[in-house]
Amino acid sequence: MELVPLKIGISCFPLIGGSGILATALGSELARRGHEVYFFSYAQPVRLDLPQEGLHFHRVEVAHNPLFPCPDYTLPLAVKMAEVARSKQLDLFHVHYAVPHALAACLASQIVGPSAPRIVTTLHGSDTTLLGQDPDYRTAIEHALVHSDAVTAVSENLRNQTQQIFHLKRPIEVIPNFFTPNKPKRSREEVRRDLGLTDEFLVLHLSNLRPVKRIDLLLRTVAKSKNRARLRLFILAGGPFDPYEPLLDELSLRKRVIVRQNTAVVVVAFRVGGIPEVIGDSCPLYPFGDLTAAAAALDALIESPDLARELGERGRNRALERFSADRIVPQYEALYRRVVAGR
């Protein structure tokens, strides 16, 4: 029996960040699989490539009403979601990040009434582990999670932390982030040439550079390496690097670091929660703040190219086997079907 395509509303942040990128990639993959996907945000998500068959974007205008001291986004978002839910007869809302998206979905559901779409809330991290600890947000977040029809987390660690913070009777399903494997568009030699590299050992860091990412410890690890003269640190930044500029001079790393706002490379990382299952046994993890252990791991890779290649390939194979779109997206589809069937 052929399954009927679903009509799915996705609410997410539009900026460069894990939750928005995952939501956009998921919506695109769902559209390729024949579903109709409607995005809601105050700006078009940076990874949302339009036009694409099955993809639609509804811009939400942030309300600047002179009657109120602060702009409001949650209410206009809820109204827009309710309007589209009614006009397009959406089957479900999939909201990414509890605040404000899950709250807006709950309100939209109340506006629509008995025929309202089901609600799937995906937690990405700081929406519960940080905001969930804040008394100004905690009760509202818990309300949104309790009134969701399904709650997912992107890692076991996040699920465990969420269960400790909130009193949820409904189980939280872990569905990891994913990627769509693509062949490199440029050769390794071309990229290294453009970066001005010769035979240096290249260390790559990608993040939004928020303080929680601890870029300071990364720089201190590089400075502590006995092979620092043989390595270059390439930071592909999703945020401003300015706060760390003084540390480059303090550690004499100015010539060792390249900052620029599909590789098979090994990971060196601290054991701090997050999503360690992505790494698995492809490399060891170290206690948070142990710069000596991290630098030693870095030196071992620099001094043993064969080991670096072996661990890098192991990591790439793990990613392909466990975290490709073809493996993860069907898990979301199956969840959607269960939730909609329970209406």
Image (cartoon, rainbow, N blue to C red):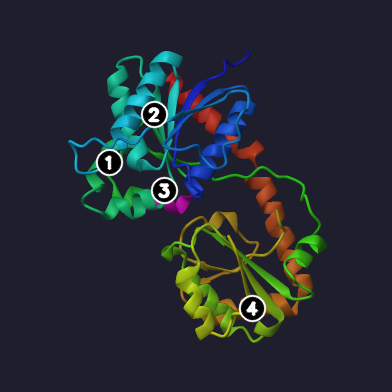
**Number of residue marks:** 4
SS for dot 1: loop
Q: Main secondary structure of the magenta part?
A: helix
Are the residues at dot 2 and dot 3 in contact (C-beta closer than 8 Å)? no
Amino acid carrying mark 3 in the image: Arg
Q: Which residue is mark 4?
A: 256
Q: Which mark is residue 159?
A: 3
Amino acid carrying mark 1 in the image: Pro
SS for dot 2: strand
Q: Which of the two residues, 247 or 11, is positioned nearer the viewer here?
A: 247
Question: Can you see residue 154?
Answer: no
Q: Which of the two residues, 257 or 7, is positioned nearer the viewer here?
A: 257
Looking at the rendering, the stretch of residues picked out in magenta corresponds to: 155-161
Residue 270 lies, in percent from the top left, at 51, 69
| Residue at x 74%, y 76% (from the top left corner) | 200
Q: Which residue is mark 1?
A: 71
